[in-house]
Image (cartoon, helix red, strand yellow):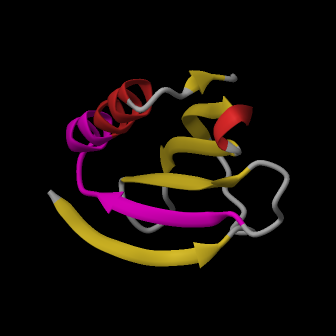
Amino acid sequence: MLRSEVGLQEEGIGMQGRESESAWAKIQPEKNCFRYYAIAMDDDLFSPFRITMSWGRMGSRRLKQLVRVFDDRVSAELFYAKKVKERLRNGYVLQR
């Protein structure tokens, strides 16, 4: 299923041809919690599908990013759905 995994990287990798993309926010001022999470699924030039996740504190210029590459669309969609479910469970709200 998972063919390769690229570790944490600084934000700034440009991508084209995004198929699915969503951004989430968790804002709790009383806990000083201002979090951002985005996930995108797209075709890759060298492999069938890749999921890119980025997260961090809102307003920060140093967001973290993780890219995972999948051999088939089904496993990529399952992973995407799993991450969306985790965000909902953890109190994030869909932004776009």
Question: Considering the image in quadrants, where does the N terminus appear?
Answer: bottom left
Residue at image coords 59%, 22%: 93
Residue 71 is left or right of residue 18, and the answer is left
Residue 23 is left or right of residue 2, and the answer is right
| Number of numbered labels in the structure image | 0
Task: Using the image as rendered, state which of residue 88 and residue 72 is in the foreground.
Answer: 88
Task: Using the image as rendered, state which of residue 52 and residue 95 is in the foreground.
Answer: 95
Residue at image coords 83%, 65%: 61
Q: Position of residue 63 (x, y in %)?
A: 69, 63
Q: Position of residue 44 (x, y in %)?
A: 49, 58
Extent of the magenta region: 63-79
Q: Position of residue 74 (x, y in %)?
A: 22, 36
Task: Write down the quadrant of residue 48 in the picture.
Answer: bottom left
User: Is 48 located above or below residue 47 in the figure?
Assistant: above
User: Is 47 located above or below residue 10 in the figure?
Assistant: above
Residue at image coords 60%, 21%: 94
Which residue is at the far front?
30
- 65 falls in the magenta region: yes
Question: Considering the image in quadrants, where does the C terminus appear?
Answer: top right
Task: Using the image as rendered, state which of residue 30 and residue 28 is in the foreground.
Answer: 30
Residue 80 is left or right of residue 60, and the answer is left
User: Is 84 located above or below residue 32 in the figure?
Assistant: above
User: Is 79 located above or below residue 46 in the figure?
Assistant: above
Q: Position of residue 71 (x, y in %)?
A: 24, 56
Residue at image coords 61%, 32%: 24
- 47 falls in the magenta region: no
Task: Using the image as rendered, state which of residue 94 and residue 80 is in the foreground.
Answer: 94
